[in-house]
Image (spheres, helix red, strand yellow):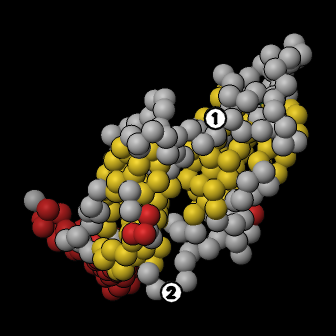
């Protein structure tokens, strides 16, 4: 039936328009064939590129230390990242502001959410205040020093994290609010879930250095990190990363003036 229709359309063109019709019919067919061939060519070119990367998986295990660890903890919020063992890491500092990755840490219910945020260097983080009262956002730590001042419900300010490091973030009004921005010099990073599992997608095979950070956990064998691993399609699973709990490091932090928090707050601050 299909061939009958194709043949009949061919003769319709020839008989109704003569040789010009025949040329038009052939040109139309050729252009369709060209489009089909181009689609096939690009599909074949893209599929092998995707197949060249792997998803690196692993598990973090946080064990209670001898004496130092108190309070509740689990295996979540460990940040794991991979950097090529040789060659320059992937830096974003030269990018224009419009192409920078953008993230968000909410101030809601007197908490920073998420509590731990891993980002590639050069990223911008927005800090919107979703509570019906004032908050402040500041950091005095090594990754980035900043103070976004006091701001009201519905307002938002942002910070560009242009160098790698761990940046602890606090509110100058509410001592219970804390967050950590883990700025990594690599596009290959992940944060563990409650079971300690993590997966890092789109990693090209090769030799990498594995680093790990956890708010209250230190590697069981610190001398092993950063640890070199060879990633391939047949070896994309890291062996368990064992951490030992070192206690709540942020529990008694100071305010932005380096002093203890004032417990008597005014009504606008709640
Ligand atoms: Cu606050």
SS type, badge 1: loop
Residue sitting farthest toward the front? 67
Up-down: is 132 above or below 204?
Answer: above
Q: Which residue is mark 2?
A: 87
The circle on residue 36 is none
192 displayed left or right of 261: left
Q: Which residue is mark 1?
A: 251
Q: Position of residue 135 (x, y in %)?
A: 80, 30
SS type, badge 2: loop
In x, y percent, where is residue 3? Answer: 12, 67
**What is the quadrant of residue 160 in the picture?**
bottom right
Residue at x 35%, y 80% (from the top left corner): 206
Q: Is mark 2 within 8 Å of ligand 1?
A: no
Can residue 103 be seen in the rendering of this structure? no
Number of on-image labels: 2
Give the crowd class for mark 1: few <14, some 14-19, many >=20 residues within 10 Å.
few
The quarter of the rendered structure image containing the N terminus is: bottom left
Is 45 on the left or on the right of 190, as rendered?
Answer: left
Q: Which of 123 and 235 lies nearest the eye of the viewer?
A: 235
Would you say the residues marked 2 and 1 are in contact, meaning their CB atoms lie under 8 Å apart? Answer: no
Question: Residue at point 86% right, 18% down?
Answer: 265
Going from the N terminus, do you reach mark 2 or mark 1 first? 2
Residue 67, above or below 59: above
The image shows residue 176 at horizontal and vertical percentages of 68, 28
Instruction: Inspect this view and state whether residue 203 appears.
Output: yes
| Quarter of the image that includes the C terminus | top right
Compare residues 188 and 40 and report the one nearer the observer: 188
**Cα–Cα span, label 2 and label 1:** 39 Å
């Amino acid at each position: 039936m299909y061939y009958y229709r194709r043949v009949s359309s061919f003769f319709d063109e020839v008989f109704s328009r003569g040789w010009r019709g025949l040329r038009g019919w052939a040109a139309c067919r050729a252009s369709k064939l060209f489009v089909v061939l181009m689609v096939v060519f690009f599909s074949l070119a893209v599929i092998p590129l995707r197949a060249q990367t792997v998803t690196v998986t692993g598990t973090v295990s946080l064990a209670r230390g001898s004496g130092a660890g108190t309070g509740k903890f689990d295996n979540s919020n460990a940040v794991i990242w991979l950097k090529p063992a040789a060659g320059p890491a992937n830096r974003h500092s030269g990018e224009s502001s419009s192409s920078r990755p953008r993230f968000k840490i909410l101030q809601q219910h007197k908490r920073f959410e998420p509590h731990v945020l891993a980002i590639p260097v050069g990223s911008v983080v927005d800090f919107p205040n979703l509570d019906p009262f004032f908050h402040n956002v500041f950091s005095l730590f090594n990754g980035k020093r900043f103070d976004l001042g006091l701001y009201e419900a519905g307002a938002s300010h942002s910070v560009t994290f242009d160098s790698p490091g761990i940046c602890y973030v606090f509110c100058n009004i509410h001592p219970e609010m804390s967050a950590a921005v883990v700025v990594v010099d690599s596009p290959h990073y992940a944060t563990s879930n409650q079971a300690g599992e993590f997966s890092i997608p789109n990693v090209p095979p090769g030799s990498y250095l594995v680093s790990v950070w956890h708010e209250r956990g230190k590697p069981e064998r610190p001398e092993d990190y950063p640890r070199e691993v060879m990633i391939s399609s047949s070896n994309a699973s890291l062996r368990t990363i064992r951490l030992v709990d070192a206690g709540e490091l942020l529990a008694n932090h100071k305010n932005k003036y380096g002093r203890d928090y004032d417990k008597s707050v005014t009504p606008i601050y709640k």
